[in-house]
Image (spheres, rainbow, N blue to C red):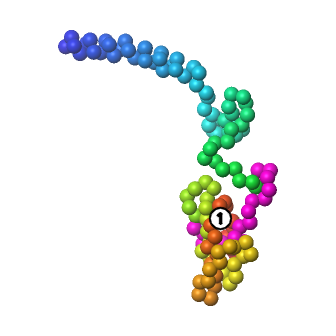
Amino acid sequence: MTGRAAAILVLMLSLPAAAHLVAADGVDADTIRLPSDGGDGLATNKGGEEQTPPDKVVAPTESAGGALEAEKPWACCNNTVCKESLPPVCRCLDKVKECAAACELCEPSGINHVCNDWYRGDPGPMCA
Protein backbone atom coordinates (compact mmCIF):
# COMPACT_ATOMS: atom_id res chain seq x y z
CA MET A 1 0.00 0.00 0.00
CA THR A 2 2.88 2.37 0.72
CA GLY A 3 4.20 1.74 -2.78
CA ARG A 4 0.90 2.87 -4.27
CA ALA A 5 0.80 5.95 -2.09
CA ALA A 6 4.37 6.82 -3.09
CA ALA A 7 3.52 6.39 -6.78
CA ILE A 8 0.46 8.62 -6.42
CA LEU A 9 2.51 11.24 -4.56
CA VAL A 10 5.21 11.26 -7.27
CA LEU A 11 2.52 11.58 -9.94
CA MET A 12 0.81 14.45 -8.11
CA LEU A 13 4.12 16.31 -7.75
CA SER A 14 5.19 15.74 -11.36
CA LEU A 15 1.96 17.00 -12.97
CA PRO A 16 2.44 20.70 -12.06
CA ALA A 17 6.08 20.48 -13.17
CA ALA A 18 5.03 19.00 -16.52
CA ALA A 19 2.35 21.67 -16.94
CA HIS A 20 4.96 24.35 -16.25
CA LEU A 21 7.31 22.89 -18.88
CA VAL A 22 4.57 22.70 -21.49
CA ALA A 23 3.54 26.31 -20.83
CA ALA A 24 7.15 27.53 -21.03
CA ASP A 25 7.71 25.69 -24.34
CA GLY A 26 5.00 27.69 -26.15
CA VAL A 27 6.44 31.13 -25.32
CA ASP A 28 8.45 31.47 -28.56
CA ALA A 29 5.95 29.61 -30.76
CA ASP A 30 4.20 31.45 -33.60
CA THR A 31 0.46 31.85 -33.38
CA ILE A 32 -1.54 29.65 -35.72
CA ARG A 33 -4.60 31.50 -37.00
CA LEU A 34 -7.50 29.57 -38.46
CA PRO A 35 -9.97 31.00 -40.98
CA SER A 36 -12.66 30.73 -38.31
CA ASP A 37 -10.70 33.21 -36.15
CA GLY A 38 -12.00 36.06 -38.31
CA GLY A 39 -8.68 36.79 -39.99
CA ASP A 40 -8.59 38.29 -43.46
CA GLY A 41 -6.80 35.42 -45.11
CA LEU A 42 -3.54 33.59 -44.88
CA ALA A 43 -1.25 33.66 -41.89
CA THR A 44 1.59 36.12 -41.92
CA ASN A 45 5.22 35.61 -41.06
CA LYS A 46 7.09 37.72 -38.50
CA GLY A 47 7.66 40.47 -41.08
CA GLY A 48 3.91 40.84 -41.58
CA GLU A 49 3.76 39.80 -45.23
CA GLU A 50 1.13 37.30 -46.37
CA GLN A 51 2.27 33.73 -46.96
CA THR A 52 0.95 31.26 -49.55
CA PRO A 53 0.81 27.66 -48.33
CA PRO A 54 2.94 25.34 -50.49
CA ASP A 55 0.04 23.01 -51.29
CA LYS A 56 -2.14 25.82 -52.64
CA VAL A 57 -1.57 26.66 -56.29
CA VAL A 58 -2.56 30.19 -57.18
CA ALA A 59 -3.60 30.10 -60.83
CA PRO A 60 -3.92 33.33 -62.77
CA THR A 61 -7.61 34.20 -62.89
CA GLU A 62 -9.52 37.40 -63.27
CA SER A 63 -10.39 37.36 -59.57
CA ALA A 64 -6.70 36.95 -58.61
CA GLY A 65 -5.78 40.01 -60.64
CA GLY A 66 -3.86 38.08 -63.30
CA ALA A 67 -4.78 37.01 -66.80
CA LEU A 68 -8.00 35.15 -67.46
CA GLU A 69 -7.94 31.44 -66.70
CA ALA A 70 -7.48 28.94 -69.52
CA GLU A 71 -10.52 28.35 -71.69
CA LYS A 72 -12.59 25.30 -70.78
CA PRO A 73 -12.64 22.56 -73.44
CA TRP A 74 -16.47 22.62 -73.26
CA ALA A 75 -19.10 25.31 -72.85
CA CYS A 76 -21.37 23.26 -70.57
CA CYS A 77 -21.49 19.65 -69.37
CA ASN A 78 -24.10 17.32 -67.88
CA ASN A 79 -21.81 14.35 -67.22
CA THR A 80 -18.59 15.49 -65.53
CA VAL A 81 -16.01 13.25 -63.92
CA CYS A 82 -13.78 15.04 -61.41
CA LYS A 83 -10.78 13.89 -59.38
CA GLU A 84 -10.91 14.80 -55.71
CA SER A 85 -8.33 17.57 -55.61
CA LEU A 86 -8.22 21.30 -55.05
CA PRO A 87 -8.78 22.74 -57.55
CA PRO A 88 -10.75 19.87 -59.09
CA VAL A 89 -9.46 18.21 -62.25
CA CYS A 90 -12.45 17.34 -64.45
CA ARG A 91 -13.42 16.02 -67.82
CA CYS A 92 -16.77 15.97 -69.59
CA LEU A 93 -18.21 12.70 -70.91
CA ASP A 94 -21.10 14.31 -72.84
CA LYS A 95 -21.52 13.05 -76.39
CA VAL A 96 -21.82 16.03 -78.73
CA LYS A 97 -22.08 16.49 -82.49
CA GLU A 98 -18.90 18.57 -82.55
CA CYS A 99 -16.30 19.32 -79.87
CA ALA A 100 -15.62 22.90 -78.79
CA ALA A 101 -12.71 24.72 -80.43
CA ALA A 102 -10.72 24.64 -77.16
CA CYS A 103 -10.86 20.81 -77.00
CA GLU A 104 -7.48 19.26 -77.86
CA LEU A 105 -8.41 15.56 -77.58
CA CYS A 106 -11.74 15.16 -79.40
CA GLU A 107 -12.50 11.48 -79.99
CA PRO A 108 -15.36 9.95 -81.99
CA SER A 109 -17.99 7.96 -80.09
CA GLY A 110 -20.39 6.43 -82.57
CA ILE A 111 -21.90 9.26 -84.61
CA ASN A 112 -21.04 11.79 -81.86
CA HIS A 113 -17.79 13.02 -80.29
CA VAL A 114 -16.41 13.19 -76.73
CA CYS A 115 -13.82 15.71 -75.54
CA ASN A 116 -11.33 13.74 -73.43
CA ASP A 117 -9.38 16.77 -72.17
CA TRP A 118 -8.78 17.05 -68.44
CA TYR A 119 -9.45 20.58 -67.17
CA ARG A 120 -8.10 21.98 -63.89
CA GLY A 121 -10.77 24.13 -62.29
CA ASP A 122 -14.52 24.46 -62.01
CA PRO A 123 -16.21 22.19 -64.60
CA GLY A 124 -18.73 24.90 -65.44
CA PRO A 125 -22.52 24.93 -65.77
CA MET A 126 -24.80 22.09 -66.76
CA CYS A 127 -26.34 22.20 -70.24
CA ALA A 128 -30.02 23.10 -70.60
Residue 36: within the magenta? no
| Closer to us: 48 or 77 | 48
What span is in magenta? 63-81
Q: Can residue 103 be seen in the rendering of this structure?
A: yes
What residue lies at 79% left-to-right and 52% top-to-bottom?
Answer: 66
Q: Describe the element under mark 1 as helix, strand or loop.
A: strand
What residue lies at 62% left-to-right and 37% top-to-bottom?
Answer: 34
Residue at the spot of label 1: 119
Q: Residues within 10 Å of mark 1 (few under 14, many from 20)?
A: many
Relative placement, left or right, of 7 versus 46 is left
Give the dominant element type of the magenta stretch: helix, strand or loop. Answer: loop
Q: Position of residue 26 (x, y in %)?
A: 54, 22
Which image quarter: residue 112?
bottom right
Which image quarter: residue 60?
bottom right
When the figure is inspected, residue 124 is found, relative to residue 59, above or below; the finding is below
Q: Position of residue 77 (x, y in %)?
A: 66, 72
| Disc 1 residue type (three-letter) | Tyr
Residue 64: within the magenta? yes
- What is the quadrant of the C terminus in the image? bottom right
What residue lies at 65% left-to-right and 78% top-to-bottom?
Answer: 106
